[in-house]
Image (cartoon, rainbow, N blue to C red):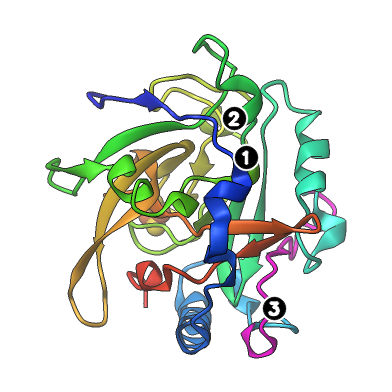
Amino acid sequence: MDRKLRPAPVTDTAELIGNNANMINRRKFLRYGLNSATGVIAVTLGVLGFASVIMPPSGSSSGDLSVKYWAKGREDEAWYGADHLQPMKKSDFVEQAKSSSVGMSGAQGVWNGLPVNVTYVPHSKNSGKPLANNIPRFQLTEGKDATGKIIGHFEDLSDADPSLFPSEDLVMVFSRCTHLCCIPGWQLVANDYTEDSWTPGGGDVKGSKMFCICHSSRFNPTVLEMNTNRNRSNGQTFNYAGIARSGGPAPVGLPIIPIAVNADVIEGLTTYVDWLTYCD
Ligand code: FES
């Protein structure tokens, strides 16, 4: 892969979040939650039973921004299965990562009726170490459109809004595949791409990818880039901060949804809901 990757800096979380934690556009939040819930019902399914996703019991109408675990049908298999529809907690991810040989963990979730995926990457612990296999951290890169043309660098966006850089070593993305809108998961199926390993450089070799079972697209939650997609309703293209597509038919990566952690609970920020429109 001929991308110029740069290691990401270690950044103070409180500084990153700033006042953005309070930025809520309730009208958009409600609109996109409902629209996307409908889209989920219509789409071919991913690994978890998202056909039955409806607004969470304490969804946007109550202003609840917490992300909930989603393990429907896999309550006995996923590590978070017993917590289906309970709020995600950072401490759960940190604890789960202890059983990973590379220190990562991830879970499927639902936020405002949207399928999302959260991955814990031990970036703050590893970013000062030599770049080597199985020492994962975030890497920042330029992104390309579907034709291969470079459109910009992740830092072009994160310099303007630091909340885009994953806070608390957690990256949350909208979990709708940019190929045909299935729902990729993180280590919910077993194959080379989802094994417990990590390689630097943003390539497609093995390890710790989000994998879409529909047509085998792969996304690397540790590689952050600028990306571009098209609003399905109005046809307009938009650039966004995302995780990189590493392989398969998906043309581009998945949008990041900035988060905050409040009293250990992971909450999504509604700053960039316009990025979640490509499957509507
Ligand atoms: S919908 Fe994900 S690879 Fe086709």
Which residue is at 53% across, 49% downward?
A: 16
| Label whose residue precedes the other's in the sequence (1 or 3) | 3
Q: Nearer the viewer, residue 116 or 82?
A: 116
Residue 223 in the image, given as x and y percentages of width and height: 42, 35
Asked if residue 204 is positioned above or below residue 210 in the image, the reply reads above
Numbered-mark total: 3
Marks 3,2: beta carbons within 8 A: no
Residue 64 counted in the magenta span: yes
Q: Which residues are magenta?
A: 60-77
* Secondary structure mostly taken by the magenta-highlighted segment of the chain: loop
- Residue marked by disc 2: 123
Residue 196 in the image, given as x and y percentages of width and height: 64, 26
Residue 238 counted in the magenta span: no
Q: Is residue 160 left or right of residue 115?
A: left
Classed neighbour count for the residue bearing mark 2: other residues with Cα under 10 Å, few (<14), some (14–19), many (≥20): many
Q: CA distance from mark 3 to mark 2?
A: 28 Å
- Residue marked by disc 3: 64
| Label whose residue precedes the other's in the sequence (3 or 2) | 3
At mark 1, the secondary structure is helix
Q: CA distance from mark 1 to mark 2?
A: 6 Å
Image quadrant where one finds the N terminus: top left
Type of residue at label 1? Answer: Asp
Type of residue at label 2? Answer: His
Which residue is at 50% across, 59% downward?
A: 257
Asked if residue 11 is positioned above or below residue 126 in the image, the reply reads below
Asked if residue 252 is positioned above or below residue 51 in the image, the reply reads above
Which residue is at 66% across, 22% downward?
A: 102
Q: Is residue 17 left or right of residue 63?
A: left
Quadrant of residue 244 within the rendered picture = top left
Type of residue at label 3? Answer: Asp
For ligand 1, give the image quadrant: bottom left
